[in-house]
Amino acid sequence: MKRTRPGTDPHHDPMGLIFEAYRMDELSSTDCRTILLNWALGMPDGSEYTSSLAALHSIYCSEHPDHPMTAVIKEGLTNAANPKSVRGRHTSRRKRPLGDGSA
């Protein structure tokens, strides 16, 4: 059985990164984004990131409305609800017909 830190949520924050972030006083939004990325990378396979992020929002954000992690979590939830369509460079280039190589 995997051990977790006291006060952490073993399902939504198994490594306690979000818990620890809220205990830190002088974090920038960049620091919080890095912590959130590490949180996402450390989640077990098959995790529902959006539902875990929503659960973390309900746990921490009402008690810490001015913490920079609160803004980053809200941004993550907003981006998850409204994903942007990203076209890769390959699909956006005009396709040339195969030929003899002369331009």
Image (tube, rainbow, N blue to C red):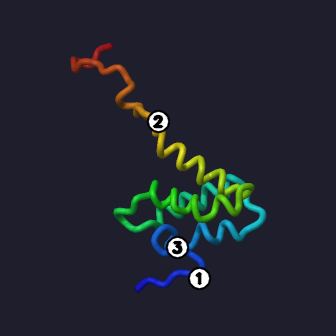
Percent coordinates x, y for residue 52 in the rendering: 47, 61
Quarter of the figure that contains the C terminus: top left
Q: Is residue 22 above or below residue 34?
A: below
Of the pair 99 and 11, the residue shown nearer to us: 11
Residue 18, located in which quarter of the rendered image?
A: bottom right
Q: Residue at x 66, y 57 (%)?
A: 69
User: Tag 3: residue type?
Assistant: Asp
Q: CA distance from mark 2 to mark 1?
A: 37 Å
User: Tag 2: residue type?
Assistant: Lys
Q: Which residue is mark 2?
A: 84
Q: Residue at x 62, y 52 (%)?
A: 72
Q: CA distance from mark 2 to mark 3?
A: 30 Å
User: Tag 1: residue type?
Assistant: Pro
Percent coordinates x, y for residue 48 in the rendering: 40, 59
Q: Which residue is mark 1?
A: 6
Residue 43, located in which quarter of the rendered image?
A: bottom left
Q: Residue at x 60, y 50 (%)?
A: 74
Q: Which residue is mark 3?
A: 9
